[in-house]
C-alpha cells in the first residue's frame, strides 16, 4: 500500500506537492485524509501494531496534525461553517448537481428533530448548517440536541444533549445555534466534533460515538454565570480553537470576547476582549476567518471606547490586536455576517481582501492587512435593518477559479423592480456588478453556497408569508434561476450545503410544524429501493 501525503494548503487553496510514502501495511490502518487532516480508523478484525506509533510520528508534523479538516478539501465533504477557514462557501469538488440536472432534484431523505422532551426546552428548529464528513452528517438543533446521521439514509447514528437556555426577551430559548467543525485531535489523532452548546460551553465530541471528550465554559469568562450565548462556530488552526460569544437577545447585555482554547484539552489559552472592563456589547456573534497566521472577526454594537461596529484583524498565536475598521453606523446597524477572505488584483498586485455584510444593507470589501484604510469598495445589496422583511446576515461566496465574489441581500431594486431578496456577482477588485438576480421568495438570511459545477444555492427567510419561502438554485455563470425548491411550511435560516451527491437544506419552524433537514439528490442518482 502506498500513500500520498497531502500537506495543508496555503492561503486561497494553493496546494503543495504531495509526498509519497511507501509500504504502509494495509491491514494495520486506514488513513482517511480530509482537507489536510488524518483521521485514524482500525481495519476490521485487526489490531494496531506497535510500529504504528513510529509510522504516524514519521508522517505527521505538529502543524499538519493540528490542521482543521477544512483547510484544503481533498473530497466533496463539507467539514465546517462556510466550508473552510477562509469562509469561501465554495465546495469545488462537489459536482454531482449541475446546471443541466438541477431541475431534477428530488428528496432522498429527511430528518425531523423529535422536538422538546424536557420542561423549558426550546422548539425544534434547525438554525445551524449541517457538517458532512466521511459519510456522516452532523447537525445541532434549537432543542439543544446534537445529531450524527448516516449520509446515505438519514438514520440517526447517535445524539447528545448539549444544553439550552430558557426564554428571555426574544420570546424563546436557544439550543445549538452554530455549525459544528470537524478536525482531528492533534495529540490522539481522533476525529472530533467541536461545537458550541446551548448552555454556554464549548464541546468536543468523539465523531464516531458522540461521547464528550471535553466541555469547556465559554461565556462570561471569569464567572460562573451563563448570561451570554455562543452564536458562532469554532475556528480551528494550529492546535487552537477560536470561539466568541455575545448577548442572548440583548438581555442582559454582556461584555463580549473572542477566546482561544487548546484543541486537545479545551483549556482556555487567551482572551481578546472587545470592550474595556465595565462596558457591555460589541458582541462576537460571528465566526472568525483565518489564513493560519491572522484572524478576522466582526463585532456588534456596544458601549463607546472599544471595538464596537468593527471588523478586526488579530494575530492568531496570541490574539494581539493588529488593525481594524469601525463602521460609522449607530443603533443596531452592526455587522451582520462573518467575514470572508478573498483575493483581488489592486495596483497590479494580488491583494488579500476581506468582506462582510452589514445590517445597514451594505457590503464592504477591505484590504485584509490594512483595515484602517477603510473599504476599497462598498455596495448597497439591501435595505437597512428591518426584521419584518429580513436583514443582511449572509456571508459572501468566493470562487477563486472564476475570480467572482457572490453576495446575497434582502429587499432591493433591480431594473426598477423591487425584490424581497437578491444575489449578485461582483468583480472583487472594484465592486462592479457582473450579474444580479432578484428573488421573490424573500430575503437571503443564511449564507448562499456554491458547488464545483457552477450551481449556487440560496434559501429565503420570509416570516411575513412563509408560503413563499424556497431554495433557489442559480447558474453561477449568469445568474439565471435553474430551479426552485419550495419550503412552504418553514424558513431557511441556515446555509444550504453541497456535499457528495446531495444538497442539504436545514429549516426552522415558525409555526406549529417542526424544522427538518432534507437531503436532495438528482433523480438519476437516487438509489432505487430494494
Image: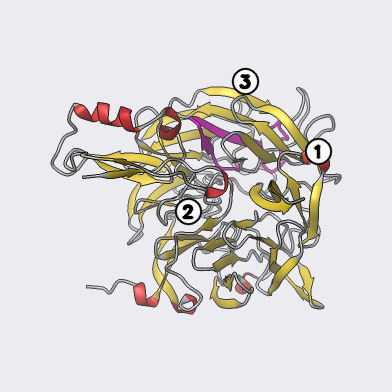
Mark 3 vs 2, N-terminal side: 2
Q: Relative to 254, does residue 182 appear above or below in the rendering? A: below
Residue at (61% x, 56% y) in the render? 398
The residue beneath circle 3 is 222
Secondary structure found at label 1: helix
Q: Which mark is residue 130?
A: 2
Of the two numbered discs 3 and 1 in the rendering, the one whose residue sits closer to the viewer: 1
Of the two numbered discs 3 and 2 in the rendering, the one whose residue sits closer to the viewer: 2
Distance in Å between CA atoms under marks 2 and 1: 35 Å
Mark 2 vs 1, N-terminal side: 2
Indicate whether residue 247 is drawn in magenta: yes
Residue at (13% x, 42% y) in the render? 45
- Mark 1 Cα within 10 Å, few/some/many (few <14, many 20+)? some
Region in magenta: 231-256
Q: Quadrant of the C terminus?
A: bottom left
Q: Extreme left residue here?
A: 45
The residue beneath circle 1 is 372
Please state the horizontal and vertical placement of residue 137, each as a whole percent of the image: 40, 53
Distance in Å between CA atoms under marks 3 and 1: 31 Å
Instruction: State if disc 1 and disc 2 touch (CB < 8 Å).
Output: no
Left-right relation of 476 to 32:
right
Amino acid at each position: 500500500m502506498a500513500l500520498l501525503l497531502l500537506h495543508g494548503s496555503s492561503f486561497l487553496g494553493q496546494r503543495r506537492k504531495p509526498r509519497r510514502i511507501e509500504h504502509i501495511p494495509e491491514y494495520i490502518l486506514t488513513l482517511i485524509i480530509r482537507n489536510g487532516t488524518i483521521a485514524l480508523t482500525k481495519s476490521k478484525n485487526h489490531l494496531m501494531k506497535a510500529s504504528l506509533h513510529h509510522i504516524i510520528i514519521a508522517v505527521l508534523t505538529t502543524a499538519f496534525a493540528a490542521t482543521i479538516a477544512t483547510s484544503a478539501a481533498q473530497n466533496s465533504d463539507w467539514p465546517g461553517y462556510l466550508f473552510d477557514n477562509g469562509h469561501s462557501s465554495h465546495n469545488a469538488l462537489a459536482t454531482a448537481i449541475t446546471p443541466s440536472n438541477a431541475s431534477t432534484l428530488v428528496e432522498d431523505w429527511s430528518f425531523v428533530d423529535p422536538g422538546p422532551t424536557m420542561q423549558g426546552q426550546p422548539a425544534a428548529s434547525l438554525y445551524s448548517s449541517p457538517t458532512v464528513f466521511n459519510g456522516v452528517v452532523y447537525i445541532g438543533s434549537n432543542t439543544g440536541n446534537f445529531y450524527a446521521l448516516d449520509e446515505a439514509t438519514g438514520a440517526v447514528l447517535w445524539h447528545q444533549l448539549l444544553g439550552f437556555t430558557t426564554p428571555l426577551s426574544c420570546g424563546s430559548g436557544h439550543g445549538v445555534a452554530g455549525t459544528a467543525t470537524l478536525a482531528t485531535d492533534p495529540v490522539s489523532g481522533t476525529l472530533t466534533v467541536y461545537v458550541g452548546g446551548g448552555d454556554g460551553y464549548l464541546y468536543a465530541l468523539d465523531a464516531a460515538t458522540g461521547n464528550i471528550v471535553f466541555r469547556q465554559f465559554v461565556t462570561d469568562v471569569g464567572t460562573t454565570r451563563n448570561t451570554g450565548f455562543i452564536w458562532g462556530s469554532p475556528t480551528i488552526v494550529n492546535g487552537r480553537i477560536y470561539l466568541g460569544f455575545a448577548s442572548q437577545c440583548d438581555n442582559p447585555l454582556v461584555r463580549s470576547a473572542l477566546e482561544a482554547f487548546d484543541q486537545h484539552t479545551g483549556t482556555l489559552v487567551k482572551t481578546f476582549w472587545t470592550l474595556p472592563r465595565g462596558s457591555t456589547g460589541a458582541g462576537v456573534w460571528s465566526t472568525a476567518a483565518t489564513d493560519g497566521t491572522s484572524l478576522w472577526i466582526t463585532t456588534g454594537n456596544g458601549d463607546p471606547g472599544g471595538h464596537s461596529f468593527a471588523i478586526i484583524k488579530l494575530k492568531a498565536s496570541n490574539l494581539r490586536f493588529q488593525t481594524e475598521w469601525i463602521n460609522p453606523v449607530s443603533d443596531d446597524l452592526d455587522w451582520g455576517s462573518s467575514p470572508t477572505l478573498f483575493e483581488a488584483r489592486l495596483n497590479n498586485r494580488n491583494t488579500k481582501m476581506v468582506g462582510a455584510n452589514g445590517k445597514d444593507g451594505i457590503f464592504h470589501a477591505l484590504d485584509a492587512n490594512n483595515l484602517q484604510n477603510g473599504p476599497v469598495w462598498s455596495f448597497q445589496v439591501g435595505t437597512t435593518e428591518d426584521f419584518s422583511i429580513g436583514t443582511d446576515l449572509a456571508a459572501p461566496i468566493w470562487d477563486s477559479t472564476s475570480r467572482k465574489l457572490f453576495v446575497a441581500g434582502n429587499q432591493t431594486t433591480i431594473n426598477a423592480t423591487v425584490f424581497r431578496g437578491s444575489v449578485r456577482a461582483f468583480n472583487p477588485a472594484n465592486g462592479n456588478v457582473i450579474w444580479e438576480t432578484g428573488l421573490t421568495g424573500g430575503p437571503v438570511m443564511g449564507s448562499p453556497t456554491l458547488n464545483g459545477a457552477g450551481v449556487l444555492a440560496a434559501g429565503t427567510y420570509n416570516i411575513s408569508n412563509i408560503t413563499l419561502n424556497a431554495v433557489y438554485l442559480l447558474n453561477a455563470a449568469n445568474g439565471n434561476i435553474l430551479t426552485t425548491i419550495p419550503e412552504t411550511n418553514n424558513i431557511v435560516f441556515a446555509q444550504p450545503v453541497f456535499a457528495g451527491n446531495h444538497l442539504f437544506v436545514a429549516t426552522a419552524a415558525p409555526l406549529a410544524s417542526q424544522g427538518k433537514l432534507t437531503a436532495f439528490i438528482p433523480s438519476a442518482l437516487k438509489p432505487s429501493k430494494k
